[in-house]
Every structure is written in C-alpha cells, then in structure tokens.
C-alpha cells in the first residue's frame, strides 16, 4: 500500500497554475479552491477518483460600476484599499539667466469623497517619501455607496485647483485593465514618462492591472490637452476592491 504519486503531481500542477495567474495579473487576488481524492490511499496500479473546485476572481466590473470620468459605485459590500503610486509635480529652479539649474517635488494632496459627503485628505506628501506598498486609506463600502477622488498641489504658499472625478474635464480619470489613457500623445510614447507609471502599461499603451484594481491618473498642472505637459502623471492612485461579508 502506498500513496499515489499522481495525486501529488496534480496538486503540484494546480499550485503552479495558481502562481502563474497571480504573477500575470499583478494582483494579490489569486484563484482559490480545493482538491480531494477517494480513496486517499490506493494500491499500486489503481486510480483514485479526483474532485476539484477552483474559483477564479471576478473582474472589478463585477463588484463596482465606474461612471466616467471616475465615480465608483459599489455593487456589493467591499473593502477598498488606496495606495499612492507617485506624485510628480515638479518645480524647477533657474539661475539669473533663466536657465534651469535643478528643481524639487512639491507637496501633493489626494482627497476622497464618500457618497455626498465632503472631500477629505487621504494623502499629503512629496514624491520622494512615497511607498507604493503603503495603504493610505481603507474604506468599507456598502452596496450603492459611491466614491470620488481628487488631487491638488501646494506651491509658493498657495493651493492649486482641486480637480476631481466629478469634473468632466478628464483631469482625474479612473481606468481598469485594458483601458487606454486619453492623452494626446500616448503615455508609453512620452519622453518624460514617470517610472511609477511604467509597470501599469503594456507595450500598446493600455492599462495593465489586476482583476480587482482601478488606477486613478491625475493631471494637476495643465488644462490644455494639446500641451505636451498634459500627460496625467502628476498624481497616481491604485485602488483595490475586496469582497467582505
């Protein structure tokens, strides 16, 4: 009497499949399931009956509705985790001849509004201090709850205009896997593309995200879409949704 090596091989194969799916989607959400065999101990040359059940994570559109340019409405009870990928508003320094000699990142603020409430700060810092793995806001959403995001920066003692997902000027947009950012020059062709954007773009310039992710891209320094500086790279948020009971 001995354990069947076929069972061990199949379990190992399913483990590898799950690992590959996780790597491809860049998401913490992975397939889950179970595998059982009857009988669990078999004689050499005989075959057990195998039963397995694998659940593939649902797409983000199965749990939320995204109303352009970026209002999110929950379809079921969810936990929402927000991370800041980058905040690249840059102030250049010049010499007496007007030549650029350097520069620095200016403080940038991200705000969030739940339902019809007021916008409130969820992040304030400069790009130098950002850790994209840090969750800056966790929010429980009930079915029907709506969420909007916005951003602005602080420079020379003044705040810039607060642009939000309730404005229809596309200064702040929400994108999911497979979407293309609405820039005049595609992001992946931008000569000054920010490094924190690159992992979330494929070679065709489409957004590359996990199954439960939404990325928010913000343009805070330009309003003319024909200007080369209008590139939706001033502030970027990654929002992940997880179902809860």
Image: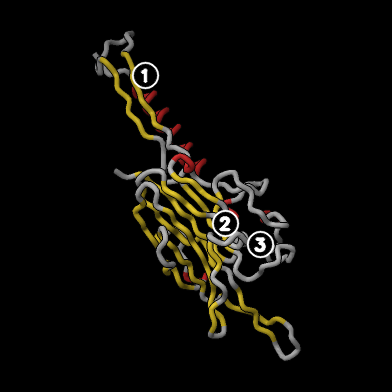
Quadrant in which the N terminus is drawn: top left
- In the rendered image, the vertical position of residue 215 relative to residue 22, given as above or below: below
Residue 73 drawn above or below residue 148 = above
**Left or right side of 233 for 48:** left
Q: Position of residue 214 (x, y in %)?
A: 50, 51
| Front-most of residues 13 and 21 | 21
Q: What numbered label is drawn on residue 173? A: 2
**Residue 231 shows which numbered tag?**
3
Looking at the image, is mark 2 or mark 3 nearer the viewer?
2
- Residue displayed at 63% across by 61% down: 169
**Marks 1, 2: nearer the viewer:** 2
Q: Secondary structure at mark 3?
A: loop
Residue drawn at point x = 30 percent, y = 10 percent: 44
Q: Where is residue 86? Give x, y as percent.
A: 53, 64
Between 235 and 182, the one lying in front of the other is: 182
Direction from residue 38 to residue 53 in the image, left or right: right
Alpha-carbon span between mark 2 and mark 3: 12 Å
Outermost residue, top side: 45
Report the side of 151 relative to 19 (left or right). Answer: right
Question: At which x and y percent is residue 124?
Answer: 45, 72
Using the image, tell me which numbered label, if any, was put on residue 39. none
Name the mark on residue 6: 1
The answer to which image quadrant residue 183 occupies is bottom right
Residue 131 position by quadrant: bottom left
Pick whichever of labels 1 and 2 is earlier in the sequence: 1
Query: Label 2 crowding class (10 Å Cα cut-off): few <14, some 14-19, many 20+?
Result: many
Q: CA distance from mark 1 to mark 2?
A: 50 Å
The quarter of the image holding the C terminus is top left
Q: Is residue 134 visible?
A: no
Distance from label 1 to label 3 (Cα)?
Answer: 54 Å
């Amino acid at each position: 009497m001995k354990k069947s090596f076929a069972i061990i091989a199949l379990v190992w194969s399913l483990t590898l499949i799950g690992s590959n799916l996780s790597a491809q989607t860049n998401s913490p959400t992975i397939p889950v399931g179970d595998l059982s065999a009857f009988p669990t101990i078999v004689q050499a040359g005989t075959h057990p009956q195998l039963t397995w059940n694998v659940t593939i994570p649902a797409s983000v559109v199965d749990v939320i509705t995204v109303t352009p340019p970026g209002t999110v409405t929950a379809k079921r009870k969810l936990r929402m985790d927000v991370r800041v990928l980058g905040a690249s508003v840059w102030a250049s320094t010049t010499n007496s001849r007007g030549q650029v000699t350097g520069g620095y990142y200016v403080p940038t603020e991200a705000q969030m509004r739940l339902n019809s409430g007021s916008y409130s700060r969820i992040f304030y810092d400069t790009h130098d201090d950002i850790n994209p793995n840090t969750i800056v806001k966790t929010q429980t959403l009930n079915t029907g709850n709506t969420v909007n995001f916005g951003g602005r920066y602080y420079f020379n003692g003044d705040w810039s205009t607060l642009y939000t997902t309730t404005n229809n000027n596309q200064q702040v947009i929400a994108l999911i896997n497979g979407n293309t950012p609405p820039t005049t020059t595609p992001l992946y062709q931008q000569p000054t593309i920010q490094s924190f954007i690159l992992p979330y773009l494929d070679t065709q310039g489409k957004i590359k995200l996990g199954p439960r992710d939404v990325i928010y891209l913000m343009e805070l320094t330009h309003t003319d879409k024909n200007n080369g500086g209008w590139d939706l790279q001033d502030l970027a948020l990654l929002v992940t949704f997880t179902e809860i009971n």
